[in-house]
Image: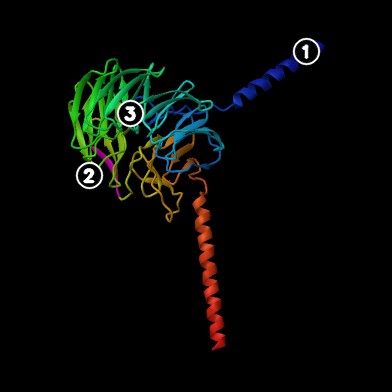
Amino acid sequence: MNVNKKFLIGFLAMCLMLAQISMVPVFAADWPMFHLNEQRTGNLEQSADFTPTSWYFQTGESIKSSPAIMNEVIYFGSSDGYVYAVNLEQGTQLWSYKTEGAVISSPVLVNETLYIGSMDGYLYAQDTKNGEVEWKYKTGNSIESSPTVDGDTIYVGSNDGRLYAISTNGSLLWEFESGNAIKSSPIVNGSIVYFGSDDGKVYALDAETGEKKWEYTTGDKVQSSPSILNETLYVGSNDGKIYALNLEDGALSWNYEMGKPIKSSPTIDSADNSLFIGADNGKVACVDTRNGTEKWVVEGLGAVKSTAALLDNKIVFGSDDGTVYILNKYTGKEEWTYNPGYYLMNAPLESSPVVYGNMIYIGGNDGYLYALKNDKESGPISIFAYYIGGAIVVILALLVGLRAIRGRKKKEE
């Protein structure tokens, strides 16, 4: 009887343990670099079980850097010169590090190291746990390009017109000089690194040696970062066109006219052969990756410099009209929007959003990072609501005061 009782207790304990294990949430995959991965697709296949409270986090100046996420910590830069690490659930700061220039570049996370560029001209390697600088490499000018890491090599562009290949120990491997500043973020595919330059060209270099394989000339600066699907590279230009180029030789497959400069980068849905991109004229288009055929267009928004992210059957991006747009990816129909300035105190949203579970994270030129809940179609009540509310109270008080004064004057008459 005692043996059976012990067996029963043990069996129940084991069941309880298994039940507890089964209740442990499976968290969404990480978003470790600008536009998610080395192909810059912006499309994260993930479970949608991460839904903490919405929040906002304030920095000292505008946030144009696109965040990166690893182990439920979000990392990003601000124009106040700091690199920040913030808890993903509560929006509380874990650490910050001050560089000597604005941080527009987006971070890339590899193991426990963060790599990011600054307008002070340095590429920084930092410990993700505390922000401590492991090493930094000085380029010839400010860095707006977001780095990418392939194996033991970091690739990053500088406004000195050079693309740098730097070892993960901080030593220079090679550099390639283009004809102007490189703000486009490089992308590695196989043994080739691709990027755009303000000289109006798209370059393909040998990733080991920096030897040029080919170049393609567009009609204006190429500040958009390339994306890759199968054997084709997609990139926007300030000449208002999106280009589809053959990876092997740079031959043009097709181009699509947007009408105004394209500073955002292509977002690709490989399952549906769709490419999403925005332009400075407030136009957002979905085109077929195979031939450039237009699937749908949305117009009349503010300038779209933000690069879209895919979330289930939606695309998410920011606009210079101060609004985060969430559109149906098949039709372009608006699903919902979020405007932290409440249409009265709008600030551009140039940062590219990242998605994690049911959450959307995006920075604004107002200096705030916002955490939005997609499943609830809502965001935090921003500080601007209180400013607007306070202003309304003051206006109402003035109106009441004026009315009282007029009332007294009438009585005196």
- What is the CA distance from the residue labelled 2 to the residue labelled 3? 25 Å
Earlier in the chain: of badge 2 and badge 1, it is 1
Q: Is residue 226 left or right of residue 12?
A: left
Instruction: Give the quadrant of the C terminus.
Output: bottom right
The image shows residue 48, relative to residue 54, as above or below, that is above
- What is the CA distance from the residue labelled 2 to the residue labelled 1? 79 Å
**Residue at mark 2:** 259
Q: Pinpoint residue 142: horizontal percent, then vertical percent.
A: 34, 33
State the mark number for residue 270: 3
Would residue 172 be counted in the magenta stretch? no
Q: Pinpoint residue 297: horizontal percent, then vertical percent.
A: 28, 44
Earlier in the chain: of badge 1 and badge 3, it is 1
Q: Which residues are magenta?
A: 292-299
> Which numbered disc, 2 or 3, marks the residue closer to the eye?
2
Q: Is residue 1 visible?
A: no
* Total numbered labels: 3
The image shows residue 317, relative to residue 124, as above or below, that is below
Main SS category, magenta section: strand
Q: Callout 2: 10 Å neighbours few (<14), some, many (20+)?
A: some
**Residue at mark 1:** 4
Give the image quarter of residue 109: top left
Q: Describe the element under mark 1 as helix, strand or loop.
A: helix
- The foreground one among 127 and 361 is 127
- Mark 1: amino acid: Asn
Residue at image coords 28%, 35%:
223
Earlier in the chain: of badge 2 and badge 3, it is 2
